[in-house]
Image (tube, rainbow, N blue to C red):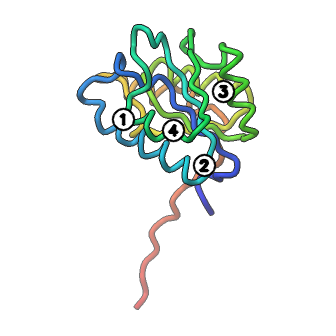
Amino acid sequence: MALLDREDSVLVVVDAQPGFLAVEAEPAVERMAWLVALAGRLGVPVVVTEEEPERNGATDERVAARLPAGTPVLTKPTFGLVRTPEILDAVRAAGRGTVVVVGCETDVCVAQSAIGLSEEGFACVVIEDATFSPGEMHERGLADDRLDEAPQPGRFEREPERERTS
């Protein structure tokens, strides 16, 4: 059983912009770029947000270069993307029930977007190593209890190790 169904998933890249990316964000940016390229190859729709691009810059070039043709890149004036009707409409237009969220900053825009999307009825998956906030704020964002309460496509528990008989 797959962890995610690509036919039911949409990738949302939240604010992967230079203004939010410190040097220590490099591994997360590389993972974002890889996921965007993978989504393109698998036919998974992608939606991109940018917060104040005139101040924070456009989407990081490593991510932008891998976006599938026609990917909407939308300005997000609020922390959570669901408060911007054009962005929520773009996510809904994908016709998918699971939103995979990557981007910046984990404790604010990523968390608020995932929480808002779950309140709108989407299952949400936040990719830990493809999100970024500086310092301890990354872990704080991931530890937000509201993310744990959000609908998810499935919780998978490892089966206990079995003793080998040979």
User: In the image as oriented, which residue stretches furthest toward the front?
Assistant: 69
Q: Taking the image as drawn, is residue 106 in sight? A: no
| Camera-side residue of 39 and 1 | 39
Q: Which residue is drawn at 42% across and 37% down?
A: 130
Q: Residues within 10 Å of mark 4 (few under 14, many from 20)?
A: many
Secondary structure found at label 3: helix
Dot 3 surroundings within 10 Å: few (below 14), some, or many (20 or more)? many
Displayed quadrant of residue 26: top left
Q: What element carries label 4?
A: loop
Q: Which amino acid does label 3 sit on?
A: Leu
Q: Position of residue 153 (x, y in %)?
A: 66, 46
Q: Nearer the viewer, mark 4 or mark 3?
A: 4
Q: Earlier in the sequence, mark 1 or mark 2?
A: 1
Spatial CA span between label 2 and label 4:
29 Å
Binning the other alpha carbons within 10 Å of mark 1 as few (below 14), some (14 to 19) or many (20 upward) gives many
Residue nearer the viewer, 30 or 155: 30
Name the quadrant containing residue 132: top left
Residue that label 4 marks: 67
Q: Earlier in the sequence, mark 1 or mark 3?
A: 1
Q: What residue type is labelled 4?
A: Leu
At label 2, the amino acid type is Arg
Residue that label 2 marks: 155
Count of residue discs: 4
At 54% from the left edge and 55% from the top edge, which residue is drawn?
Answer: 157
**Image quarter in which the C terminus is found:** bottom left
Which residue is denoted by mark 1 in the rendering?
A: 29
- Give neighbour class at mark 2: few <14, some 14-19, many 20+ (Cα, 10 Å): few
Which quarter of the picture shows residue 97? top right
> In the rendering, at what x and y percent does residue 34 appear?
42, 46
